[in-house]
Amino acid sequence: VESSGRSRKNAAILSDSRPRSPCSSSASDPQKQLDEVFLAHHETFRCCVDALSAPKAGTDANMALVVTLDSAGKLTSSDILLSETSVQAPEVQACVTDVAKALAYPKPGNDMDVRYKRVFHFKARR
């Protein structure tokens, strides 16, 4: 599902494609807050790829996920960016967005709506 392209006037747009150390956290920095959430659940997202991509086991996978949170930290959308995703199987994409929907998110430290992009790089298990 491509992101709808809807923009919010007061939304902060954040993007990261690499994990960050939880030690670098700042309660007021939404980027770091969300880096920590996704780093803590990396293996859960990976399970979607491992379990549902069995025919392509042994290959690396990239998935780009965009989540939008309101100023209270409530998830308002989660979308896969197809243009940045190597796993095109709808069931894998649905699993990843379902995991994103099930997570608890912190209230953004800047009290603004936040749009965050996470690019997962899953290395093949040998």
Image: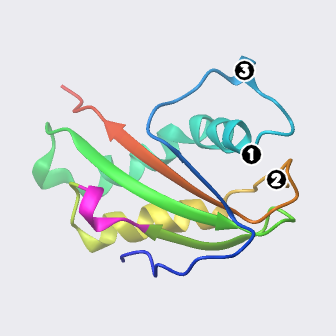
Q: Given the image, on which type of amino acid does mark 2 rest?
A: Pro
> Label 3 to label 1, Cα distance in Å?
12 Å
Q: Which residue is mark 3?
A: 24
**Residue 83 magenta-drawn?**
yes
- Evaluate if marks 1 and 2 touch, with contact meaning CB atoms under 8 Å apart: yes
Numbered badge on residue 108: 2
Q: Which residue is mark 1?
A: 30
Q: Earlier in the sequence, mark 1 or mark 2?
A: 1
> Label 3 to label 2, Cα distance in Å?
16 Å
> Label 1 to label 2, Cα distance in Å?
5 Å
Viewer-proximal residue, 11 or 50? 11
Query: On the rendered image, what quadrant is the C terminus found in?
Result: top left
**Element at badge 3?**
helix
Question: What's the magenta region?
Answer: 80-85
Q: Given the image, on which type of amino acid does mark 3 rest?
A: Ser
Viewer-proximal residue, 12 or 23? 12
